[in-house]
Image (spheres, rainbow, N blue to C red):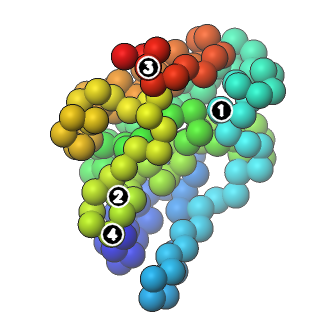
Amino acid sequence: MNTPRMKQGVGKLRHKRVANLIGSCCDGDERLLVAEYMPNDTLAKHLFHYQTIEWAMRLRVALCIAEALDYSSTKGRPLYHDLNAYRVLFDENGDPRLSCFGLMKNSRDGKSYSTNLAYTPPEYLKNGRVTPESVSFSFGTVLLDLLSGKKYSPESRA
């Protein structure tokens, strides 16, 4: 990861629907990113473990994710990588916020790697590139999670 470049890109994004990046440190091989603290867990925990999300909140989460994706695309970071229920966090007020880490490459060679195959679009598995269509696919899988409240295996989504 290129820390100065990251500061110029993701570090400057500020939005109420994004868990904003507030700092970073690079010391030799050690890398540290600091984002706003989100104390109320992830969407995945609420959907798959706690089962505590009412329908109104599920709709609100979908809208908030869409707003965060729209914001990032208008600020020159159009391709949110690795969108999934684990990337949606809840702040101290219970408001859903999209993690800023999906807006960065996650390797030294500049490539992005998916952390959860259940949300990975088939095209990405073939060519290794994030496209607007792959972001739409991932958003659709999050919507499926919100509607069903269930976690699906990669095989069942094929």
Of residue 69 and residue 102, the one placed in the foreground of this image is 102
User: How much space separates mark 2 and mark 3, taking CA atoms?
Assistant: 26 Å
Of residue 125 and residue 9, the one placed in the foreground of this image is 125
Please give the residue where the numbered disc 3 appears in the rendered image. Answer: 155
Instruction: Return the disc, 3 or 1, that comes first in the chain's sequence.
Output: 1
Tell me the kind of residue under disc 3: Glu
Residue 71 x, y percent position in the rendering: 40, 41
Instruction: Return the disc, 1 or 2, that comes first in the chain's sequence.
Output: 1
- Numbered badge on residue 105: 2
Of residue 104 and residue 117, the one placed in the foreground of this image is 117
Q: Which tag is nearer the camera, tag 2 or tag 3?
A: 3
Tell me the kind of residue under disc 2: Lys
Disc 4 residue crowd, few under 14, some 14–19, many 20+, Cα 10 Å: few
User: How much space separates mark 4 and mark 3, taking CA atoms?
Assistant: 30 Å
Disc 3 residue crowd, few under 14, some 14–19, many 20+, Cα 10 Å: few
Instruction: Return the disc, 2 or 3, that comes first in the chain's sequence.
Output: 2
Q: Which tag is nearer the camera, tag 3 or tag 1?
A: 3
Dot 4: element? loop
Does the CB distance between marks 4 and 3 fall below 8 Å?
A: no
Is 118 situated above or below 130?
Answer: above
User: How much space separates mark 2 and mark 4, taking CA atoms?
Assistant: 8 Å
Quadrant position of the N terminus in the picture: bottom left
Instruction: Return the disc, 4 or 1, that comes first in the chain's sequence.
Output: 1
Q: Is residue 36 left or right of residue 63?
A: right
Looking at the image, which residue is at 39% across and 59% down?
Answer: 106
